[in-house]
Image: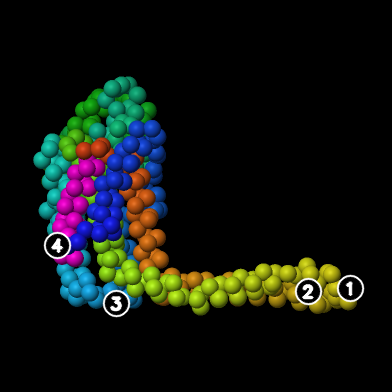
Amino acid sequence: MVLSLYKVFLFSLCPLTLIVGHTVSQYISLEVDRDGWFNTYFVKQGWFWTSLVGWWCMIRYSGFGHRGTWKKTLLRYSVLTGWWMVFTQSIWSEAAPLMDLVFTATGGRCSFDVFDPSDPRTWQINEKFHDTLTRRQSSLRKIYQALKQASTNPSVVLENAVSAVEYWLSEGREHLMNIEMTPHQLNTYIDEALHSWRRINSSNLCRSLGGHWKGGHDPSGHIFLITLMCMFLLGELQAIGRKALRKLKTERRFWLALKTHSTNIVQSGAVFTSFSRQSVTWKALLKELAVAPVNRSKQLLLLTISTFRFVVWDNPIIALVVLTVMWWWSFLVTTIAFHTLPEQISGLLCAYIVAAIVYWKLA
């Protein structure tokens, strides 16, 4: 395999970005909403979007030529998908993904330290229990529901835990100041009750019960996933890049349509030019006022359809490049805002080693 400049770029992009992100993190800090729409519907569903765009490009450009048959492309994709599932997903209910096995093997566990034990008189929510107020409130409700499910044959301790959390949710922390237990004891009751009820060995199960990972080495799942996605998109771009670029260079219909629709949009809004004509009647002016918005909407619709066809149908390479840039930016933000450097490096290496082998040996 000849080492071209493109392959140097492919294999060095993510490691260099991690170095840049870690350097930047020494000087600035970012606050990122983990539950925002972009992270919830886009990044966390990233393999779906990457698969959709990547395979659509392959289909549109028939990019299975000199790089090998469609079987090789499918083989590379299958290896990456399988590794993603083994490392980050619970394939069946009792099996923890590899990243969670690493976490628990290094001393990590699902923690339910809901209340701050440092001041038993105030009954404050522990600020280390999740990273945002919204997550804390949501997790407390999940804990309450889990405790109710676990209390089919409740012990006195479990009844106390359920009652205490219910009181806190309904009445506020002042209601707990008179009960005969401390925040530390209540945390212990909740923790013991839920761990005895379920074997909590995965981060997904922990979150579903309202807990959070604490201690241990937690390989960055975001870094892992984004590395795989960037490597897949950029790796398969080798097969379709030249053909896609030639097609993009010869594409003239869109630019002519863009010019035509833009001109029509501007002209359809020129209502006030009617005032310059002395012979204009109110009837004609009202007609222009009514027709202009319709014409402009029509031209905007035609422009939208033309743009959609140009990007999605004729030149999906544009969508692939835009998606790759978005993943790269998410990678950079993750290196600045989340996880420790060792956890970022382990997430990168776990993805990079497999992806590098795939595009070094199977390309």
Q: Is residue 261 left or right of residue 113?
A: right
- The residue that appears at 46% across and 75% down in the rendered structure is 251
Q: Is residue 47 visible?
A: no
Element class at badge 2 = helix
Q: Is residue 274 left or right of residue 352?
A: right
* Mark nearer the viewer, 2 or 1: 1
Label disc, if present, on residue 361 of the rendered structure: 4
Determine the CA span between mark 2 and mark 3: 53 Å
- The residue that appears at 29% across and 28% down in the rendered structure is 116
Q: Nearer the viewer, residue 125 or 216?
A: 216
Packing grade of label 1 (10 A; few <14, some 14-19, many >=20) is few
Packing grade of label 3 (10 A; few <14, some 14-19, many >=20) is some
233 up-or-down from 291: above or below: above
* Mark nearer the viewer, 3 or 4: 4
Which residue type does callout 3 highlight?
Answer: Ser
Instruction: Quadrant for the N terminus, please.
Output: bottom left
Could you tell me residue 94's position as x and y percent?
12, 53
Label disc, if present, on residue 286 of the rendered structure: 2
Marks 2 and 1 in Cβ contact (< 8 Å): no
Which residue type does callout 2 highlight?
Answer: Leu
